[in-house]
Structure formats: C-alpha cells, structure tokens
Amino acid sequence: MKDTHKHKGMRNQLADVLVAKGIADKNVLDAIRTIPRHLFLDSGFEDHAYQDKAFPIGAEQTISQPYTVAFQTELLQIKPNDRILEIGTGSGYQTAVLLHLKAKVYTIERQQELFKKTKLFFTKMNYRPKKVVFGDGYKGLPEEAPFNGIIVTAGAPKVPKALMSQLKVGGKLVIPVGVDSQTMTLFTRKSEKEFEKQELGAFRFVPLLENKN
C-alpha cells in the first residue's frame, strides 16, 4: 500500500487530462491529484489506475472513469458539511472524492462481497463516511434524509421517486438515466413539488438493479 512520487506525477497528468476535457472545479481537481486511485484497484492493475478509463473491480462492477467521477462530482457543487448520499459505493473511489470535498457521505452498496471489501478498505485508509450501508440504492436512505446532494453511480432505467423525495429544496440529484447507454441527468429541487431537469450528454454505466440484494 505505497503511494510514491511516481503515482503523484501520474495523478497530476490525469488532472491535466480532465482539465482538457472541461473539468474546471479546483476542489474536484485537487481531489483527483490527491487521492491514490491505484490503491482502489487490485495491485496487478496499478498501471491502469491513472488512465482516464473505467476498470473492472469484481462482482461485475467497475471503478468509474475518472472523467465521469469528476463530472458527476462537479455537478453537485459540494460545500463543506453538505450531506451527500451515494448510490453504489463500488471500490470507494467516488466516496473518497466526496470526502475530500469535506462532505458528510452516506453510501449504499448492494453487492455484499464489494460492500465488505470496501468497508474494510475505508477503515484501513482512514476514510470516514458517516454511513456505509449494504442495501438497495433504489430506496435511498429515508432515515437520514433530506440530502444536499445525491449521486448515482450506476445506470438507472428510470429515476427512483424515493431519491427525488429525499432531496432538500435546493438539492441536486445526479443520475445516469437509460438502459443500454445513459444520459447524465441533473435534477435540482426548486420547491416541495417542483424539479428542474437538465440532460448533460451520453455516458455508459453498469445497471442499477432494483431489489437485488
């Protein structure tokens, strides 16, 4: 579990790639430069850690492409102490980015093998989400709602109503919507009943499965 100057150099290069692709949020770029992404992958794949692409992490899941992580995070416009719900903990890399931005993170994972592995990893790395939950992301976390932001890291065929209802007024839900390929969609809650919707281009994600625990 080493993080070397070489790794830091590779992270700086990765951040430069993301800037070239349009990521502008300084705090998000600082997270990309700081977080040792190679430690979130099996050691044999270390060389792939700082390429801007998704990578398999077991349990038929992937660690999202760094650009996607940065893009989704930037959309949330996180301020320190914002309460953020993450659907799909996965390797924990996105969680670490949210924590770097000083968010209070609640994260849900439905794959038990991944849930156990990542929870252990958080402890070892001293990452401290408020809650790491094994469960169905479709349902959100009503007992901890409302949230300033909700980020979904898997493709959803439809937008779960439970997630919409768990946003604060002014809060943002970032979710890839679609079956084979997804449209990154941003919902901003304008009032109790009113949501603003923006569609922000095509992405590809593993599917968000309902009632699959």
Image (tube, helix red, strand yellow):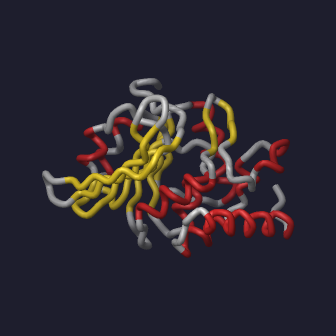
* Quarter assignment of residue 77: bottom left
Q: How many marks?
A: 0
Where is 197 relative to 115, above or below? below
Q: Is 168 on the left or on the right of 8, as rendered?
A: left
Residue at 55 percent of width and 31 percent of height: 111
Residue at 60 percent of width and 46 percent of height: 64
Residue 34 visible in the shown view: no
Residue at 23 percent of width and 57 percent of height: 189
Across and down, in percent, residue 82 comes to 39, 66
Across and down, in percent, residue 85 comes to 41, 52
Q: Is 39 on the left or on the right of 209, as rendered?
A: right
* Quarter assignment of residue 43: top right
Where is 70 relative to 109, above or below? below
The residue closer to the viewer here, 18 or 66, is 18
Quadrant of the image containing the N terminus: bottom right
Residue 87 visible in the shown view: yes
